[in-house]
Image (cartoon, rainbow, N blue to C red):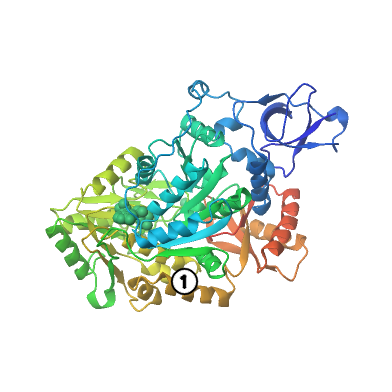
Amino acid sequence: MNLMRVALDVPLATLFDYEVPDLLELQPGDRVVVPFGARTRVGIAIETAQHSEVSPEKLKPVARVLRDAPRLSRQWLEFMRFLAAYYQRPLGETVVHALPPRLRSLRPLPKAIRQCAPLPPSGTRFVARHTLTPAQTEAVSRMRAALGRFQVFLLHGVTGSGKTEVYFRLIAEMLARGAQALVLVPEIGLTPQLESRVREAFPQTHVAVLHSALEDVPRTAAWLSAARGDAGIVLGTRLAVLAPLPRLGLVVVDEEHDGSFKQQEGLRYSGRDAAVARAKLDGCPVVLGTATPSLESWQNGLAGRYETLSIPERAVPGARLPQVRTVDLRVEGEQHGFAPSAIAAIGQRLARAEQSLVFINRRGYAPVLACDACGWAAGCERCSTRLVLHAADRRLRCHHCGAEAPIPRACPTCGNLDLHALGRGTQRVEETLGTLFPQARVLRIDSDSARRRHEHARRLEGIHRGEGDILVGTQLLAKGHDFPALTLVCVLNADSALFSTDYRAAERLFATLSQVAGRAGRRETPGEVLVQTRFPQHPLFAALVRHDYAGFAAAQLAEREAAGFPPFMFEAALRAEARKLDAALEFLRQAARAVAAREDVIVYDPVPHVITRRAGAERAQLLMQSASRPALQEHLRALSEHLYAVHAPGLHWHLDVDPIEFD
Ligand code: ADP
Ligand code: ZN
Ligand code: ZN
């Protein structure tokens, strides 16, 4: 009897054995329909087997094989095995979730896809936009030498240094050799400029765009064209790294430091790290590009595991890095959140018809609505956080669980009618700027304004053409945009991250501020960046003013090494949530005891999360550390075995390997 082990998306860490009917042509990598309990399910054939633990009379046959998508290759299955093992998730869940939702279901492919004829071969014509600068040329030729084998390059190029042009040259080279290129970006829907640049540079090439916000049909179609090898370029967010690419020859990870490459549910993979693992399996080079490398990648460069290539200057002739200055709030004071010199600088730009950007990393109107009389402050009923005031639609919103409430007319504890908005977010800053500069057009860009995608894209294009005098925005505006008329950036509240308990806060702040600063002066007009702070002497700002990433990184790495943090230690967190904190803590304690202690893995005591309650659940976590990745992996395997075996009703847990957030 022929047997096949099949991966199914059920929360069990095993494969399932099925009988293969004699006449059925079935190979590992095929999608199959199998009976499971009272239902049928779509699964993926993983490996043939000689015998089964299941008794013969209980073994069921595979019902049929689905041939509407290409067979998944051994190499791809190998990659899935790696991910499942590394991130401690069942192989079935990993494999099935790597498919677009449509291909996990029993529904046949939509007509629009079934009827489309196979694409003609993709052309490889490349339209160069610029003659490369010497630094770009040098980077390209170093990387070109590695095409055809595995190597990791860290392309450290300041903002505006023309990293995209460098990627394009390598992509062109690979396309000409008949290979596919995979380009990963943090958030694609929000940076439509890149997609059009790719299409302009490669006018004959099929470009498959993959991200989770796509509708069913375009997503399935893009995935299929990647998997069939029709698409020469696959451009997408982290999930694109999971697409089958039969002719993969180059991987690019743009803005590799960006936290959104990390998936925060299910298979908690890092798109960047997965890209490196994939390139290794496929034997091709991978380019990690950024102006502010993650300390992990930078350290890998210092240790010689990655080859670091630098582009220290901007590509556009005459464009220089902006002048960064701190504005000492202790000396200048502030009015409605602005230092007088910041207001003056914005006024100057208005007079010269140039754009300014005011950066504040908090959306909404104000982070707190409070009563002066009794000290009450509006809090979320389901989380241990405050509700954020959104003045435009007169609502209070929780930015952690999404709960909403109307603004109370009076203080619920003392009846005081005079409630105050404390602190400020983008909406309030927008209002203040409207009052200070009534003749100016103020445009706000944050995730509230970006909710309507088309409107958002239109607004960005408008800004690009020079519409809007003053832009107010969060991180969303910091990423990748190229606004030619922008010459001034004001950063409002950078200080809170300086003294955070999260050891990654400084790294993130430096990256964010470099990104925002990088928006200014991308053409001939020099840019200026004003950072309002009460701590102008802080080394982070000193490094920022000098555009000295390497100096900043050296100081951070020394601190991390002394304190025993990544990248010198590897980490994993086991997190649990329950109705009551005690239950979560107790679950973690038991899990810690269930695995034999070992000298090379440190297991800390379980602690509550900083924001303990979220969406009605109370949360705690157990941190594990080791200087050896294999040791930590072995420990986690033993821990997983225990976790998948225990029955803990009312309790949710997950493991996060290489966690980056600890809220
Ligand atoms: P980065 O991704 O490094 O921030 P981009 O690739 O977006 O930079 O390039 C920044 C700007 O410089 C773009 O407007 C691009 O067209 C331009 N540019 C890139 N390379 C060159 C070059 N060799 N000569 C002139 N302009 C260039
Ligand atoms: Zn009150
Ligand atoms: Zn909440």
Report the number of numbered marks. Answer: 1
Quarter of image, res 535: bottom left
Kind of element beneath mark 1: helix
**Residue 362 vs residue 538, the one in the foreground:** 538
Q: Position of residue 177 (x, y in %)?
A: 51, 43
- Which residue is pictured at 44% across the width and 68% down the height? 506
Quadrant in the picture for the N terminus: top right
Q: Is residue 430 visible?
A: yes
Label 1 lies in ligand 1 vicinity (Cβ under 8 Å): no
Q: Is residue 55 left or right of residue 414?
A: right
Image point 52% across, 23% down: which residue? 110
Mark 1, residue position: 553
Q: Nearer the viewer, residue 567 or 276?
A: 276
Classify residue 109 as left or right of residue 387: right
In depth, the one of 156 and 377 nearer the eye is 156
Q: Percent from the top left, x then y, of residue 246?
A: 58, 39
Question: Can I make out residue 381 in this image?
Answer: no
Tell me the kind of residue under disc 1. Ala
Residue 295 picture location, percent across and down: 50, 66
With respect to residue 464, does 349 lie above or below?
A: below
Residue 291 location, quadrant: bottom left
Q: Position of residue 509 (x, y in %)?
A: 41, 65
Count neighbours of disc 1 (C-alpha within 10 A) and say few if under 14, some if 14 to 19, many if 20 or more.
many
Q: Is residue 243 above or below residue 613?
A: above
Figure check: 616 above or below 325: above
